[in-house]
Structures are given as C-alpha cells and as structure tokens.
Image (tube, rainbow, N blue to C red):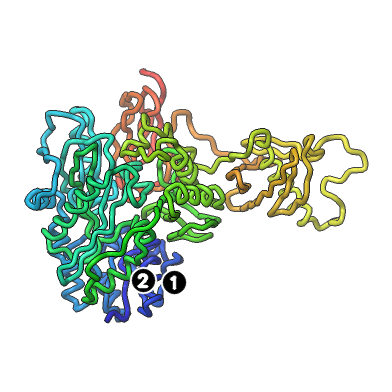
C-alpha cells in the first residue's frame, strides 16, 4: 500500500492528485522550483522539497533531484502528473529501480509510445490506421505537419504550406522539441485539414483487463494546443465510436499497457488516423470523470498497488465540457505577473493551479485553470460554463476568457461542428480574441460600468478623507462644473448623474444602479500596483485605466522600436544593423514558457539598431530592435 506519494510536477495537476490522496489517507509531498516557492500546490502538500533554480531543465526535469527529494521525505511512490517527466521512460525506470511505486505504465510501454515514429510503426502492426510518414527532406506535396517525436502539447509542431518555409520550420521545431522534451527528433506527415481531433480514454490493470471510458472531442485548438474538450464527442456516429474504441484497445494491448492512457486520432468523415498515445493522465481527464462517475487518479493509484479493475467500466451519463483558461493576450502570447483576483462562481468544477495573489512565472505553461461544466445534456453543460465564465472575477492579467465565451456561443460550436481549424483566421471564430475581458452590458447601458467605477472611486476617496469626512464628496457652496472621471478607455460625468440613472448605493467595492427600471449590481476593484479599475457585473467585465490629474513623465521609445511582448530569452537574432527587411520577416526569436515566439518586422524598412544578443534575458516592453520604415 502507498503511504506517502510525491507528485513530480507542479500547479493544477499536483493539486488534483493531492485531492485524491487526502481522500484515501495518503501523505502527500511536493517539489518546487524557486519561482514556485509560494505556489498553492506547495502549501497544500504535507511535505515539500525545493529544487533550486527556475528553468524546467534545472528543476522539474532533473531526474536526480526529483529522486533525491523522494529520499529526503521518505516517499514510497511517485505520480508524474502530465508534462515534464510524465512520459520519460528513463524516469519511470529510475523510480522503479529506487524501489518506489511508479504510478504509471511500464517503462517499456512509455518507450514504445515515447517515440512517435516508433509508435506509428507499432500501431500499423496492430492494425490501427495511421498516416504515412514523410522523409526529413522537403516533401513533394504540401501542406505538411512537422511534429516532435518525443512529446506533445503543441510544442515542436509546425504547419508548413510552402517548400520555401520547410527548412526554417523544421529547424524551429527541432529546437523547440529539444528545449521542451530534451529530444530534438521530429518527423513529417501529411496535414489532414479540417479534421476532428478525437481521443479515447483507456485504463488497464496488471491482470489483463482493459477499460475504454469513451471518447473526448478536442478539436478546438490554438497553437496546436487544446482549448475546449468535451465528452462524448458531438460529431461521431455510434459505428465510428466503436471503431475508435476497438483501435484504442488494440493499441493498449499491443504494448502491454497498464494504467491510464489516451489514444488520439484524427477523424475526417469516415477516415480515421492514429495521432499518438499519451502514456499518462491527460489534462482533460475531468470530462471523462464526470460523465463516467469515476476518479481516474484513484484508479491509477489502485492499479499501481496491484488491484484488479472490475470486468466492465461504469456506463456513461450526461455530457461534460471543459475549457482551459490561459493567461494570454489577444495574439495568444503568454502573460506573466500577478493574478490579483481569481474567483470562478457557479455550478462548475474548477481545477486550478492558482489563487488570488498567485504570480504567473514566464518559465512554465500559462494555464490558470480548467473549468468544467456537466449536465444531463450538452446544452446544459455549455450554459453552466458560459455563466461561470461571464461571472468570473479575473484581475491583473489578460486572459482568454472572452475567447472561450465566444467559442461556446458560436453557432458552429453549438451545432457540434468543430474541427482543428476552428480558430484559424478563416474558421468559424474569426479574428484574435481581445485578451482582456470586455463589457457586454445590455444596449443603452454601455456607460453604466464606467459610471460605477467613477462612483466607487469617489466613495473610496471620501472614505480616505481626513478633513470633514462627513461632508458629501465634491461638496461646494456654489457648484460651477460637473464632476467627471477620465479613463483611457472612456470618460463619464457622475455628478450630476445621467438622465434616467439612479444610485441605489455606492461603496468603494460595490455600486448598485438603476436605469430604465432595471437594477444592476457592479463589483468594483482597484489595485494600486497596476493602476487598473475592474468592474464586474452580470454582463461581463470592464477594465479601465484612470487618467491621473498630474501624469508622471513617461519614457518615449524611438519610432519603429520592436518591443518584447513578454519576458523571455533571446533564442536567436536573424538580422544585423543596416540590413533591409520586408514586412513579416523574422527579426529575432524569443523563447518564453517553453515555446518559441517569432518577432517580425511590422513594415518594410532598414534595421537601424539591434539592442539584444543571443541568450540575453529581456523583460516585457524592452526594446529589441529598431526598424526604420522605408527602403533606403
């Protein structure tokens, strides 16, 4: 029996495993890097061991340090979570050789699926349909997909549509794969566009029983990473579901699989093609748990202890939809900094690695939480999710909250018509999401959140007053001017009030207004550190930036300056001073949160200066280079 389990991971998945361990009476242990010293998963563990450093390679990916942590706190079992070392056969082998219980599949099964190249060969032998593999030289036909052999999650993956882009994207995929997984091996296969991404959950014990717990639809993606997942898939037939499940069982039996795993497929019409097998628990496992009424982590632990599974899995009931809430801007660029408030209300499940006051580091994935709605029908699950997202209070960082609502309310999504190009420029959801939460107040009431912000700020100023605090705010013997509040986004007169608007109450943190016979409550928050005012209400959220009466001098940057969109490391510089560039040409590449981000020239021009060099760490807003617009 397992008595003390160390989770060799961080954030949301560590907390998720701890939750099940507490219910079973298993002592929990965490590891943490220096940026994660104050993270919630560290506080929730019974014991925690520091892994000095910040970069994943120096901390969560260091097998020796993780095993030293096990010995230091007397752990007798290791759960790898997902990502990091979860699909590393050498790590699994080292855990077993140290005499510990490994909560995962045999190292041989991990190794078999760890190389996607070898995995495709094995699956073809097992009768699982696969796409043909193309050689590393430039293929004869495009588009193609370059993929990391050793990992997933969208890292080390590139779509190439033209022969002229192939070599550059191939090398970029190799670098990103090496940085994320320690292995730069990639392979190439035809790109099956507008296909569904459907995966099957399997669970196997040591006694020959293999469960199939249905399928999950994971087609809505950005940057090759899943954004929305649901169980069951709304777009496959019973006959196709049976084919997928049979193929998943063949895959699991072919490699002697034990534990929880996922077999992923592309589906287009009646065509099915194997993508990969993830030899671990998936990020999106909660939708399966809710539909099948199981605790997959508990089942993992029981299988690791040698317990047999019942002959048949429980039957499914209802529908579950999960969305991934990311700290990212409108261009899908990850954000770092302090998450000042994190509150998600409603009848939804929230699996998060953060809480109010958490600091989002540039070293790791920017996912804040998974929010899951469950209901007797798909429509009910989606409605719960939309309501929770709209009422969520998310302050301090840009998030993809509005994009998620936009997806869930899109007619194509409502109809279940999703595919991997859903978020592409020509997909059903057009254009980049705004990044910051936007107000969706009813028509005719658009100024009310701004008015609420002004009234709350006035109430806060009055409460802080040290002289004549009993007088009303802005009191004058003879009034000559209306009182107004100015924000970068809007301006409003709040005394006198606009016609038809009445103030029911106005406190620094809550304002109740009535307009046109409709009463609304506005929750208002202001943080001195970022200078923003956040107004949350039933229609959404307005983020406002007050204009100071006496602005501080600001530092101006030269015209044509390319600024770092986020903290990161300069991976390479692709231009030199004096070089001519064209609009869209790569100037340099930043590495942040385990992914490469190409910084491109905004227009044709000449590079008048390069202010960084390879390997340099830069902060958000730093001047990277200057492009002088023009051709001479």
Image mark for residue 378: none
**Residue 318, located in which quarter of the rendered image?**
bottom left
Circle 2 Cα neighbour tier, 10 Å, few/some/many (<14 / 14–19 / ≥20): many
Residue at the spot 76% in from the left edge and 56% down from the top edge: 464
Circle 2 SS class: strand
Residue at the spot 71% in from the left edge and 53% down from the top edge: 508
Q: Which of the pair 205/562 is nearer the observer?
A: 205
Question: Number of numbered discs present?
Answer: 2
Residue linked to disc 1:
44
Q: CA distance from mark 1 to mark 2?
A: 9 Å
Discs 1, 2 touching: Cβ within 8 Å = yes
- Furthest toward the left, the residue is 125
130 left or right, relative to 594: left
Residue at the spot 11% in from the left edge and 38% down from the top edge: 134
Of the numbered discs 1 and 2, the one sitting upstream in the chain is 2
120 left or right, relative to 8: left
Residue linked to disc 2:
30
Counting from the top left corner in percent of width and height, residue 201 is at 26, 57
Q: Which of the pair 210/16 is nearer the observer?
A: 210
Residue at the spot 31% in from the left edge and 64% down from the top edge: 314
> Does residue 178 appear in this view?
no
Circle 1 SS class: helix
Q: Which of the pair 602/347 is nearer the observer?
A: 347
Of the 4 image quadrants, the one containing the C terminus is: top left
Counting from the top left corner in percent of width and height, residue 194 is at 28, 35
Of the 4 image quadrants, the one containing the N terminus is: bottom left
Counting from the top left corner in percent of width and height, residue 262 is at 24, 56
470 left or right, relative to 602: right
> Does residue 388 appear in this view?
yes
483 left or right, relative to 606: right
Circle 1 Cα neighbour tier, 10 Å, few/some/many (<14 / 14–19 / ≥20): some
């Amino acid at each position: 029996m397992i008595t003390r389990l160390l989770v060799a991971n961080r954030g949301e998945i560590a907390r998720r495993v701890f939750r099940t361990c507490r219910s079973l009476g298993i002592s929990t242990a965490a590891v943490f890097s220096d940026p994660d010293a104050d993270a919630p998963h560290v506080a929730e563990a019974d014991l925690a061991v520091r892994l000095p450093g910040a970069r994943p390679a120096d901390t969560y990916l260091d097998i020796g340090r993780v095993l030293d942590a096990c010995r230091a706190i007397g752990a007798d079992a290791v759960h790898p979570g997902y990502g990091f070392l979860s699909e590393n056969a050498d790590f699994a082998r080292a855990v077993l050789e140290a005499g510990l219980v490994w909560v995962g599949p045999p190292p041989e099964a991990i190794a078999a699926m760890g190389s996607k190249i070898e995995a495709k060969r094995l699956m073809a032998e097992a009768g699982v349909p696969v796409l043909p593999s193309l050689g590393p030289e430039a293929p004869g036909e495009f588009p193609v997909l370059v993929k990391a052999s050793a990992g997933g999650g969208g890292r080390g993956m590139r779509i190439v549509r033209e022969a002229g882009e192939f070599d550059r994207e191939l090398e970029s995929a190799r670098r990103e794969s090496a940085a994320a997984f320690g292995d730069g091996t990639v392979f190439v296969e035809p790109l099956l566009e507008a296909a569904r991404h459907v995966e099957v959950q399997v669970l196997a014990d040591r006694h020959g029983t293999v469960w199939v717990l249905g399928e999950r639809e994971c087609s809505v993606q950005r940057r090759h990473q899943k954004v929305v997942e649901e169980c069951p898939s709304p777009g496959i037939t019973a006959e196709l579901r049976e084919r997928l499940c049979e193929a998943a069982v063949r895959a699991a039996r072919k490699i002697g699989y034990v534990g929880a795993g996922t077999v992923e497929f592309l589906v287009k019409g009646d065509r099915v093609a194997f993508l990969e097998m993830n030899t671990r628990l998936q990020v999106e496992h909660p939708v399966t748990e809710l539909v099948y009424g199981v605790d997959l982590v508990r089942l993992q632990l029981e299988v690791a202890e040698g317990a047999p599974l019942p002959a048949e899995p429980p039957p499914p009931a209802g529908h579950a939809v999960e969305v991934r809430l990311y700290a990212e801007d409108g261009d899908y660029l990850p954000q770092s900094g302090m998450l000042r408030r994190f509150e998600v209300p409603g009848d939804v499940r929230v699996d998060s690695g953060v809480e109010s006051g958490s600091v989002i580091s540039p070293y790791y994935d920017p996912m804040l939480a998974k929010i899951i709605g469950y209901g007797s029908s798909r429509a009910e699950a989606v409605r719960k999710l939309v309501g929770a997202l709209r009422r969520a209070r998310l302050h301090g960082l840009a998030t993809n909250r509005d994009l998620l609502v936009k997806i869930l309310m899109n007619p194509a999504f409502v109809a279940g018509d999703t595919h991997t190009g859903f978020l592409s420029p020509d997909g059903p959801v057009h254009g980049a999401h705004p990044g910051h939460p936007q107000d969706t107040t009813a028509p005719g009431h658009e100024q009310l959140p701004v008015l609420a912000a002004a009234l709350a700020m006035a109430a806060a100023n009055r409460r802080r007053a040290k002289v004549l605090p009993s007088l009303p705010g802005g009191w004058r013997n003879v009034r000559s001017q209306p009182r107004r509040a100015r924000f970068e986004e809007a301006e409003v007169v709040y005394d006198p009030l606009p016609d038809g608007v009445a103030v029911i109450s106005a406190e620094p943190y809550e304002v109740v207004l009535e307009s046109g016979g409709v009463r609304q409550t506005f929750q208002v928050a202001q943080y001195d550190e970022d200078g923003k005012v956040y107004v949350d209400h039933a229609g959404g959220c307005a983020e406002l930036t007050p204009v100071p009466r006496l602005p501080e001098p600001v530092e101006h940057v030269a015209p044509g300056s390319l600024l770092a969109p986020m903290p990161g490391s300069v991976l390479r510089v692709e231009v030199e001073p004096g070089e001519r560039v064209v609009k869209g040409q790569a100037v340099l590449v930043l590495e942040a949160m385990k992914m490469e981000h190409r910084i491109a020239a905004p227009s044709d021009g000449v590079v008048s200066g390069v202010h960084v060099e390879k390997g340099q760490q830069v902060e958000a807003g730093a001047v990277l280079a200057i492009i002088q617009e023009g051709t001479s």
